[in-house]
Every structure is written in C-alpha cells, then in structure tokens.
Amino acid sequence: MERDPILFGWRSAPRAHALAVALGVGLGTPLALFALLCLRDLIDLLVPGASEPRRFLALALPLPGHPPAVLPIASGLPMSGHGLLLAALLGLAVAALAFAGLGWLVARVCFSAQARAASRLRATAVDAILRAPPGAREDVRALPGLTGSALAGLPAAGILVPAMTLAAVLLALATAALVAARLVPAMAIGLLAVGLARALQIRRGLERTSLRQQEQAAVEAGLGDLILRMPAVRAHGSAMFERRRLGLRARATHGTLARAEAALAYARAPALALVVLLPAIFVATALWHGPGAPEGAEPTMPGALAAAAAAFVLAAAMIAAFVRLWFLRMETAPTYQRLAQALDGLADKRTAPHRAAAFPTSGPLIATDAGAYDPASGERLTGLDAVLPMPAHIAIVGERGSGVQALAALLAGQIEPSVGAITYGGVDLRSLDPVERAHRIAFAGSEAILIEGTLKQNLLYGARIDEREALGEQGRIALLKLSGLDALIYARGLEGTIDPDAEPATAQAIVAARAAVREALAAQGMARLVEPFDPALYNHQATVGENILFGEAVGATFSQERLAGHPYLRAVLEAEGLTRSFIEMGLAIARSTVEIFSDLPDDHPLFDGFSLFPARERGFFEDLIARQPDGRSWRRGPAGARDRERLIGLALRYSETRHRFGLIDPELEERIVGARASFARLMPPKFKDKIDLYDPARVTAAASLEENVLFGRITQGEAGAEQRVRALIRQVLADQGLEPAVYRLGLASRVASSGPGTAVARRQGLTEGGIGPRDRVAIDLVRCLVRRPDILVVGLLPDERKSEEIAARIMRLRMIRQNLGLIVCLPDAETLSRLPPFDAVLTVARNAATLASSSPADQPAPSHAA
C-alpha cells in the first residue's frame, strides 16, 4: 500500500484524476484567459479618446529592447465601442456560467475518485483482517482506528490542486508579460511572498489549534477533578488551595498558548503588509518611466493591468489551496505510513500461499506429528498422530485447559499447525479455500460472536442462499429445539408485536385465540390467574398510569419517563380533580419507601427491585419529605412545579398489587377509570397516533403477543402463576396453529439496544449482554448445522449441566448427523460412558492426545449410523 495519501488517491483512480486534470487545466485555463481578456476590454472602454474601431480579444506581446516592439498574437475582432461593451459583458456572463458547469463537473469527478480511493482503502483493511491468521489478533486491533483516520484525511483532489496551481501561476505570469515584461519578476516575487506568508500562517495556526485543544482538555480535566474533590473541599475548607492549584495549572498552560498566539500574530503581520504593498508595487512597476524604462513604449492600459491583477488573485488563491493541501498531506502521511506498516506486518505473518486444491468429496482426517497453539483458548497441543476415518463420530475427552479446544480447532482447520500437517482426503487443509473449508468442515468454537441484527440473521450467519432455502421454517424450528434455543426464541416471540396491517390473517387468528385461552383457563380452574382488560374496570395488575392510558405508548410522547409532565395528561388530571390526590399519593409513597429502605444501602438489590424511584434519587425525596411535613407548604415557581411533577410520577408508577401501600380504594379506582374515559374521548388528533388503545375486537399493534392473546395481565402474588399461564398459552397457540408465528416473531427480534422510552422499545431490544453463555453456544452450533457440513466439529466443552443432560443433547445431535462426520468434545469419561460407542476417542491430557479406536467386539454397529 502507498504511504503517501496523494499518491494513494492517484493510484486508486488514475483515470478519474486524469480526467479532472484535463477538465480543470485543459478547459479551465483557456476559459480563465477568455474571462480576463473580456475584463481587460471592458475596463479599457473607460479610457477616453481611443480610436475606432476597437478590437475585441486582441492579443499582443510587448518585446523588450530599444526601440520597443510588439509581437502580435491575435488581431481580435473589430467592433464599435457599444458593440465591444455588449460583447465583453456577454463574454463574462458566458464565462461565469461555463465556470459553474465546469466546477460542478470537476467536483463530481473528484468526489468519484475520492470514493474509489475510500473503497479501496476499506477493501484493503477488510481483506487484511479477513486474511489475518488467528495469532494476529492484537495486530488487527489497530487497523480500524488507522483506517478511520486515513479515510478522514483522504484528499478529494490531490493531483488536481497542484496541476491547477501550476496552470494558474503560468497564466498570471503570461498576463503580466502581456502588460509589460518588467511586470513578470514582480508578479513572480509577489506570488512567492503570498505562498510563504500563507504557509507561515497555517503552520502557526495549527500550533495554536493544538495548544488550544490541550488547554480545553486540561480545563475539562481540572474542573472534573474539582467536582470529585468537592466533598473533601467542603470537609476541610480547602477552596483557596483549589483555586491556587487550578490557577497555577491554567497559567502554565496559557503561557505556552500565549506564545503560540503571539507567533501567529507575527505571521499575520506580513500578510497584511502584502495586501497594501503588492498592488502598489504592481502599479508602480507598470507605470515606471524612470531610468531603464524603454523609450517610446506605449502607456500601460488600465484594463491590461486589471486583468493581470485578477490573474494574480486567482494564482494566489490556488497557491493558498496548494499550501493547505500540503499541510494536510504532512498531517495525514504518518497515519498512512503506520497503516502501511501494519498491513505489511500482517502480510508477513501469513503463511506462504498454497495452490488452491479441489475439496475432496471424502476421505480420512489424518494428523501427522501435528502441534499448534490456539490464541482463543490459550491452549497448546503437541505430537498429534491420528487417522480418523470419515464420515464417523469422534469423541474428544479432556478437561478444560488440557488442549481439548486447541485439538478441535486444529482438526477443523481454524488454526494452522505450527509443526506437522492435517490432511483431509489426502489434501492439506491449508491448501483448501478457507470459505469452502468453513462450509464443508464446520466449527462451533468457544467464541459465539453475535452480530447486530435479528436473531434469525444471527442463526443464518454464514449460510448460503440455497442452504437457507433448503432449511425451511420447520427445519429452523427443529434446529431450535435440538440446540435448546426454542425457549429463548419462544419467549422473545411472546414479547414481540404483530402489525395487523401487514399480517391481517395472523391478527385475526390472535383475536380468535383470546376466546380459546379464556375457555382453557376456565376449564382448568385458572381464570383467576389472568385479570382481563375491561374498559369499565380498573386493572389491579397494571400501574395507575397504565390504567389511565389503557393502551400502549407509541414513541416517547406518553412514555413512562415523560408521562407525569405531559401537558395533556396533566390537563385531564386537573379536570378530573386527581392532581391533588396524586400529589398526596406520591408523597405517601415517598414517605413509605424512604422508611422501608432507610437501613439498606443504595446498591442493595431490593432497592432496585421494589422501589418506585432509583437509589440515586433517595436524597431528593428525603429532602422533599423534610420540606413537606404536612404536604401543604409547596415551593413556588419552577422548583415547586418540579416537586409536584416528581410526586405525580410516583403515583402513576404505583401498583397496589405489587407495592401494597394501601393507597387505592374503590372510590379512587372509579375516578381513575373516569379519567381513562376522558383521556380517550378528549384526546387531540395530534396525539391519537402516539398511543394504541386496547380494543377487545382487534390486535393492539404496540402490545406484546402475550398481552394480545391474554388481553389482560397475569395476576401477581400467586406462586407459579406465570409459568402455569404461559404453559397454557403455548398449548393453545400450538392447537390454533400459531406456534410458527411465535417462532417467527422471536426470530425477528433484534440483537441490539433500542434505547429507553416505551415498552415497545424495551421489548424489541435484545442486547448482546442479554443472551447468556448457553444461548451463545447454541447459536454458534445452529450456524454450523444450517450449512449441513461434511464434518461438524463441536469444540465447545459443555457447561455445568448434569452429565445426563449433556448426554441427551449429544444423542440428539448424533441422530441428525447420521452418515455425516461429527467430532464432539466431552468433559469427562463419565459423560462418554453414558453415550453409545464412538468410532474413535481422542483423550487429551497435558497438551497431548492419544487415539483409542472402538473395537468391533465392543461396538456392534457404527455409531454414526445409530
């Protein structure tokens, strides 16, 4: 990879850069000359007494000598004064439009070249990471940061700017020569001075910016440290010490910054002087008639001088752009050098490329004096000699850390042997295409890496289109049950949501299933375990706020965090006379909570599990209670409004069934139900799409599938109620043919955080940390099974489950792998004894493996066909 950003951009898209230079220089330079000549002729019209006819776009080069001579280049078009005025104005207008179109076209070409260079840079980094050997993990960790920095400093016009700068300088010198030969040195010296002044300004400005950023970081760190020290400051009265300490630190930092700013001011001074001196020098040089000036020379026309000045301004602007590009290159070049070194280092660590061999259709898996180190598990294996016939079922028995996982990874080709070789069907695994090898010899390793997306995408990660289509919906469900993921996926499905517009048939089936669930609950004497949603009754399993909304919030408008402060809800509470009641209820909740948890620390799990406010707000409510002994003397202004809003929020989150403070009586329940009716009846149209109200005749799109099927809440307080009700739901949904829909919803749940706010967001977001180790292992196993490989290597030591459970799961795995290769790791000989005999057993101890084949006497039938 090129170590220079400009050279990298050029080699990434040479044709695009060449086209940009051809357009910018080849068309831009003649167009600029045309515009300058039009400007010259237009200004020359201001000179009185010129002879008629005048000539438009005439070019003549003054030649030095005695007497002076003029070399005609173009005679121009003869025109009257009025015609020349119109032609010059029209020419300038056409040049402006042409410049706009040319600039747009050149910018598109430059951006296209930059996009190709960025794509090449990303592709280079991706290829380096994908081809990196397992032992180069630490080396590839630096690539994302280096690649991002390199992309940020990738210039769009790295070749165009120098080329246009050179063309602009030559054009300025040419226009100066058209005025007078003596003006060319002045023009060259002026452009050089502009370039040096601009370079000095940029250098000093970069130094000042760097120091200013350091000062900003120092101020932030100092103030943050001061906040952490405040308890000690208050306790020991050390405010004066802290002021002096921070003042000394600020003066030390600001002293260096002040010197840099003074240097920047000195650098700007010559530039300001040049603004005044350069025009004076040009005019004086053009009008010079003293000693050394040619006698008999024609006077300098103001139009020609103005054209030369305009060319100088254009060249100066291009020189400034070139200087900025040069400093950008100097700033970015070290990043490209480090990136190139990292890529070269990864290339050196790759093994010598082998000629891609055809993947064998069958054959034994043979290890010849093989040894390897597995960086993932930290295990090492030495001296492996084994012949494993395939297809067969092989067991690897060994404790964690003995080398069992290194052996599994070695047999699957995931790590390359440091000594010896592993062959399949007589072909070295290193000579096989890595992608094809991963599909034919699948490896369920100890790292179940999840990707951002749905659970279905995670399960099908790495599978080809034909493999996904061949699996089908029923095949996916079977694999979920085999791997033990069915419980997770089914639970996620019950928490998922149904869009009735996208799936009307499923929505109708769910509404019909409500009656079947009711009948099943009544038939089994479990009707008391579910309290249904009734528009006319208060639901004791829901909070006060949920009873008023009587629906699911869509978005953050009516979310639990914002509900207490929502103007419309507050207006409804005020109209129903509930504001005062809720404030008193919130104050009673705060008193009871503070009293109950007074002896518990803030980090106690009971606080988070049962308190209506987080532990960090305990001090606020303790202070509020102290200020409100009688609940009447409220503060005025925003502070009092904030206190009342927080208390109303406590009341809205209160559930009598869960918290049991005895604050809700039948009379208050009726008033809350009345507020529910007013809330729905008076709702403004702009809020109607912000909440999905419960309706017995339709599916609530924002509610979970479980709530839609139950159309109610499971009763709290009875042991085992949730398990019994959910088991009944599962049976009813299976009878109604809705089980595939539940699994489909579960598979559609995303492995990502949807952020706080609504119940929908909390349900739909399944964070990576929310999937336990067992489920991660199962997901990795399903990924392998979907591909139906020739050999499946399960390099995962079973967790702390009982030996019987491990054996049962491996038995199911062996059943679906009949007549196919399977290599599985077992924790101990006890688990091995509970399974039918394997075709071969590899015992691993102290980084060494020994092979023990099953004898015909001990094994009447081959295990892989059992």
Image (tube, rainbow, N blue to C red):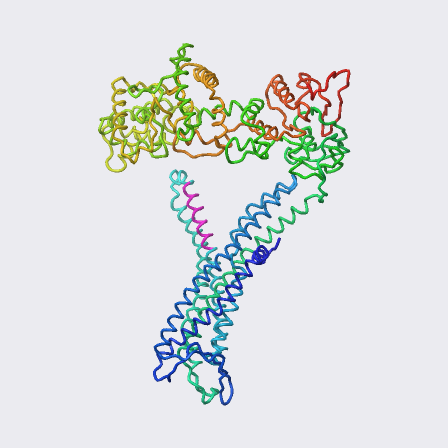
Query: Which residue is rendered at x = 41% and y = 39% of the image?
Result: 232
Q: Nearer the viewer, residue 9 or 471?
A: 471
Looking at the image, residue 503 lies above or below residue 515: below
**Quadrant location of the C terminus in the rendered image:** top right
User: Whole-percent x and y of residue 612?
Assistant: 36, 26
Looking at the image, residue 372 lies above or below residue 581: below
Q: Nearer the viewer, residue 398 or 853?
A: 853
Query: Which residue is rendered at x = 59% and y = 35% of the image?
Result: 464
Looking at the image, residue 857 lies above or below residue 548: above
Q: Quadrant of residue 679?
A: top left
Q: Is residue 608 visible?
A: no
Q: Is residue 571 visible?
A: yes
Q: How many marks?
A: 0
User: Whole-percent x and y of residue 820?
Assistant: 68, 26
Q: Is residue 216 magenta?
A: yes
Q: Is residue 718 left or right of residue 460?
A: left
Looking at the image, residue 39 lies above or below residue 692: below
Q: Nearer the viewer, residue 756 or 641?
A: 756
Q: Quadrant of residue 499?
A: top left
Tell me the chief SS of the magenta region: helix
**Magenta-highlighted residues:** 211-227
User: Whole-percent x and y of residue 763?
Assistant: 43, 29
User: Whole-percent x and y of residue 377?
Assistant: 64, 33
Query: Which residue is rendered at x = 45% and y = 89% of the image?
Result: 296
Q: Is residue 142 magenta?
A: no
